[in-house]
Image (cartoon, rainbow, N blue to C red):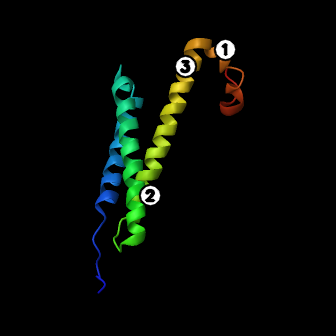
Amino acid sequence: MTLSNPPTNRHALIAFIAAILTIVSFCIGVAPIPLTGLVCYPAAILWGIVAMLFGVRSMRQLHSSGERGRWMAWFGISCGALTILMILFLITLTIIILFYGMSAIHPIWPQYIGPTL
């Protein structure tokens, strides 16, 4: 017996909600409010890991069951992974600027944004 309207996978829904919380935490961390990055970047990493784990788990379940939610699982996996990569990039860039100063980035800067005045 096949259902005409199969239920949505719970893990896919959790992955989707965690992905939204990942994006919100990352965006608040990027906001120019002092010290938000110290709280929001670790929160975004944790939510990103949750989104990826539940997304992968739901994809495995969706192959065997006839449930819906494939796009929610992919959204959780992709947003979690991309946000974690962006945070690692920002942390690396911050460490480079703190230790080597702007002189480490200045030689490559004009080729991406054009010459400065």
The residue under the point 62% across, 15% down is: 102
Report whether 40 appears left or right of 112. Answer: left
Q: Which mark, by number, is residue 74?
A: 2
Question: What's the amino acid at mark 1?
Answer: Ser
- Quick one: label 3 or label 2, which is nearer the N terminus? 2
Residue nearer the viewer, 8 or 114: 8
- The quadrant in which the C terminus is found is top right
Q: Is residue 33 visible?
A: no
Q: CA distance from mark 1 to mark 3?
A: 13 Å
The image shows residue 18 at horizontal and vertical percentages of 33, 47
Question: What's the amino acid at mark 2?
Answer: Trp
- Quick one: label 2 or label 1, which is nearer the N terminus? 2
The residue under the point 49% across, 44% down is: 82
The residue under the point 35% across, 41% down is: 47
Q: Is residue 26 above or below residue 56?
A: above
Label 1 vs label 3, nearer the camera: 3
Report whether 114 appears left or right of 39. Answer: right
Q: CA distance from mark 3 to mark 2?
A: 32 Å
Q: Which mark, by number, is residue 95?
A: 3
Q: Is residue 18 visible?
A: yes
Q: Which mark, by number, is residue 66?
A: none
Locate residue 107: give its quadrant: top right
Q: Which mark, by number, is residue 103?
A: 1
Label 2 vs label 1, nearer the camera: 2
Question: What's the amino acid at mark 3?
Answer: Ile
